[in-house]
Image (cartoon, helix red, strand yellow):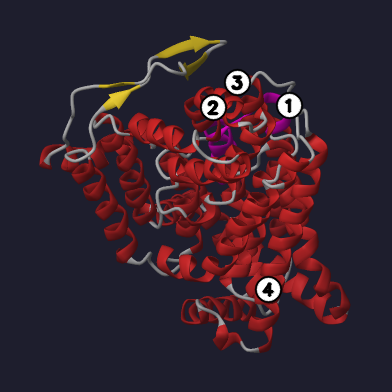
Amino acid sequence: MKPPLSFNTLLLVYGVVVLVALATWVVPGGEYRREVIDGKTLVVPGSFVYGESRPQGLGAVLAAPLRGFVDAANIIAFLFVIGGTFMVIQKTGAVTASLHRLAVVYARKPHLQKYFIPVTMLIFALGGGLFGMCEETMPFVLIFIPLALSLGYDSLVGTAIPFLGAAAGFAGSPFNPFTVGIAQHIAELPVYSGYEYRIVIWTISAASMITFVMLHAARVKKNPEKSPVFDLDQERRTTLQRDAGDDAQMTPAHRLVLGAFLLTLVLLVYGVLRHGWYITEIGALFLGLGLIAGPLGRLSLAEAADAFREGARGMTGVALIIGCARAILVVAGDGKIIDVLLYSVASTISGLHPIMAAQAMFVAQGIINFFVHSGSGQAALTMPVMAPLADVVGVSRQTAVLAFQFGEGWINPILPTSGVTMGVLGLAGISWDRWFRWMLPVQVYFFILALLLLIPPFLFHYH
């Protein structure tokens, strides 16, 4: 199905667990008091107190991944289902036949290919900007990688179209209910107020990410050996060509499988927008697809079960990494150092010029995002502190929300502690170290862009 993940990634993430545990022996313990307001557990500003240190020893380091598995059970189970379902679909031959058909269309009308990347990425950027599309991009990775390869690109392009497209929209979102909506509610701002400037930011963010991917795609198209994943893609291209030679004709069974798949995507969008579906509901939807795809594609029950088991087995390495990534938060939480970090950052920011304070808020949110990856969870942790702090340093609360949005959004795609990022890379079969080296230039660009975009709010009194 795909080459195994680099073992170095697992070592890297578990190494961070060890480092965080060592930090608990140096950093004093402390915490804010918390209270439940409107169903959300929020920290109480000004309530921080240092407490007894809680150093995490060898036992905690060994137990943390197991607890991480429990905490991340929903996303791990989701990946097993996605991996199994797509292997069933792949075994039916529907994917190979449809890719062959699409390649023929582009061969006849090559002028259409130049619109492929910007149009598809724009769709995902709209999803990220309008309803916070994030985890929902994972199934699309398995679609776009073979599609990108069939068009002469590489696996990075196939991964970037859904993942980075949605990430760009997510980070610059005018209306994301899970970040902007919750953060503004906590900061006591009208929900979705200030959207005009965020629309400008969304446009810049989406256009920048699309440009980055298109430049890479053009470079790879011209010289495939320039791709950082050229060796990984060689095997994939060979498999695609072999499958296309064996059975690339679109049959009625293939059409039924693809129809079921398209209906699943429609139901996914409907469920997320109308009923607020999340990992469990989306996973159940794709499990249903896996159950019916085999019979529709003329697979026997034994063949479908074997294919599902094979696809799920391919997710084992990803599950290990996600469990270890969640273990970082477990150790930091048990060691009572996350609130200490938040308090220290807030104390540092209080003495800065308003523009620098806003920029420091962005950097602080990015650091905290290393430990807390839930947008709503990070908002509940940081905004009760950052909103009143913004009043003190002369930064508008709207700007504080913007700094949170940047730190929670633009930094996420390279974090090895993010379950979604590592899940996407696991599905793509791309090791984190290769992804990081490829993403570093654009990540530096977005870091500088965020610092620059936090200057105008001070100049035109963004409220």
Q: Given the image, on which type of amino acid does mark 1 rest?
A: Arg
Q: Which mark is residue 186?
A: 3
Q: Given the image, on which type of amino acid does mark 4 rest?
A: Ala
Q: Main secondary structure of the magenta part?
A: helix
Tell me the element at label 4. loop
Displayed quadrant of residue 112 = bottom right
Displayed quadrant of residue 127 = top right
- Residue denoted by label 2: 389
* Callout 1 crowding tier (Cα within 10 Å): few <14, some 14–19, many ≥20: few
- Which of the two labelled residues, at mark 2 and mark 4, occupies the earlier sequence position? 4
Q: Which mark is residue 274?
A: 1
- Which of the two labelled residues, at mark 3 and mark 2, occupies the earlier sequence position? 3
Q: Residue 316, how many percent across, how many down?
A: 35, 53
| Residue plotted at (68% across, 88% down) | 222
- Which of the two labelled residues, at mark 4 and mark 3, occupies the earlier sequence position? 3
Label 4 vs label 3, nearer the camera: 3
Residue stretch in magenta? 272-292
Q: Given the image, on which type of amino acid does mark 3 rest?
A: Ile
- Residue denoted by label 4: 248
- Residue 42 lies left or right of residue 161; in this view the side is left
- Which of the two labelled residues, at mark 4 and mark 1, occupies the earlier sequence position? 4
Q: Residue 289, how many percent across, how many down?
A: 60, 43
Tell me the element at label 3. helix
Q: Residue 384, how many percent across, how many down?
A: 52, 22
* Callout 3 crowding tier (Cα within 10 Å): few <14, some 14–19, many ≥20: many
Q: Is residue 347 above or below residue 128?
A: above
